[in-house]
Amino acid sequence: MFAGMLTSCSDATDIIQKDEAGEDVVYQTVDDLQRGLNGVYSQYSPDSNDNGNGDVILFNDLFTDNLKAGINNNGHGIGMYQFNLQPGSDAPGRIWGNRYATINYANRVLRAAERIEESVDESEMSKFNHIKAQLLGLRALAHFDIFLYFTPDYLDTSSLSAIIMDYVPEILDKPTRNTAGEVAAFIKSDLEQAASLIDNSASDVLFVNKDVIKALQAKLALVTGDYPTAGTLAGELLASYPLANRTQYIALFEDLGTTELIFGLRRVVDDINIAGSWYANFSAIDGSVLFEMSRQLFELYQPGDVRIDEVLLDATSDVANNILLIDKYPGSEQPLRNDVKVIRSSEMAFIVAEAQARAGQFAASAATVQMVTDARYNGAGTSPAVSYGDLNSALNRILLERRKEFCFEGHRYLDIKRLGKEIGQGINRLTSDAASFSAPATLGASDYRFTLPIPQAELNGNRNAEQNPQYAN
């Protein structure tokens, strides 16, 4: 059994029960494919959470240095905070299982699309192609997530990586892991095919469109070392998606605007509550606080920075007593629930800055980073000056500014994984933050735990899924 593919197997798209309609009945028209596509969007959930165990938005900050124990924490997430990462840990299983379930759903709809394509009326072919493009884009995104978390070395093309799944597996399939080079090429191919099929007039940032595809291409190019391509693509997007000013930035995280958002996930009433990663009830001091912002993160910001003044820190915080409540997702339509900000133009700015730095253009790189920091002050104060003259200093500053910009959005662990070893920077928590969980304060940049283990459930069902180095099966 390919375990990841069979996650959520009670869904009608996974296993056909007795007297249940099969795919040939469920998918007969382009509108049927659209409903299937909607299901794929619903499956992808980087914001899922459950009593201190969450997907990437929680994991990236909890495993690293952006969180500490909340005032009502009774052991939620303590193992992950203590760097206890094993094949049976919750986070690897969630990430692997959710992404392969997403891929499985996408592949089933793609298989149905292939079956009905000849019967699609010419008047609906554009809609058909647009649906197919989104399915390919989502499949690429899910493979990319697995590539990022489970590949030991992005730049070593022979390094083991994800299992490429471009078909619907049989229940007894036991596929082997593909190499990093093979997975990167597969993701690139899916994105190129998606770009050739996408409706270029579509611009809704809550669905895959041509710019979402371009942003994923830029991100893939960055992590695989194609810095010129990454910088070019990211620069094009930055020109089209200006950074938010102070008012627009606040509105973005209140779901009242989309300035600087390139791709997001819509969350409706009774859907996933993203801030449920940090609160059991609602975002406030009496909302049963599981996790708080780390003191170390809080002290990185200066007065006037919209992120700390208006977005990150809840008004019911008690800074003097080190109660630092997170308010990045204040709730929209219901407490704790907000749309997910998957890709923003500020990320494109940092990709441009890194590409410039790696090309030796340090002044231009610093100016690009300065553009982001200036936008976050936007007349409310003087933003810290950005200046550096060598690559190591540039990457250190970019890593710092990415931490400030993308905390609680699912980036920190991956940023340290990718850049930390190069610049000798791992996890180095404040002693007081680490003490909130009686946890170690440091983890070296070269530690094997900056690559996730293949989940135990996958190993149990698939003897061909080789484990990552230094993890016991």
Image (cartoon, helix red, strand yellow):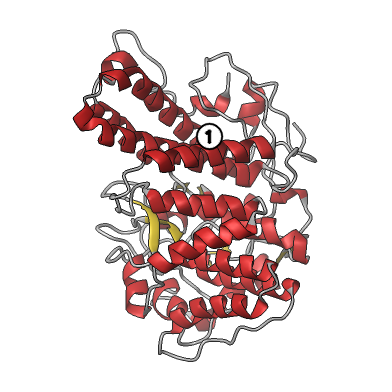
Residue 62 in view: no
Q: Type of residue at label 1?
A: Gly
Q: Nearer the viewer, residue 68 or 401?
A: 401
Would you place residue 79 above or below residue 374 in this image?
Answer: above
Crowding around mark 1 (Cα neighbors within 10 Å: few <14, some 14 to 19, many 20+) is many
**Which quadrant, please, contains the N terminus?**
top right
Q: Nearer the viewer, residue 329 or 378?
A: 378
Image location (x, y in percent) of residue 432: 66, 72
Q: Residue at x 47, y 36 (%)?
A: 139
Would you place residue 122 above or below residue 198 in this image?
Answer: above
Task: List the residue tagged with mark 1.
Answer: 97
Taking the image as shown, residue 189 lies to the left or right of residue 16, namely: right
**Which quadrant, please, contains the C terminus?**
top right
For this orientation, the residue located farthest to the top is: 18
Q: Residue at x 35, y 55 (%)?
A: 339
Image location (x, y in percent) of residue 26: 27, 19
Q: Nearer the viewer, residue 426 or 158?
A: 158
Would you place residue 251 above or below residue 32 in this image?
Answer: below
Quarter of the image where one finds residue 354: bottom right
Taking the image as shown, residue 412 lies to the left or right of residue 282, namely: right
Q: Residue at x 40, y 35 (%)?
A: 135
Number of marks in the rendered image: 1
For this orientation, the residue located farthest to the left is: 123
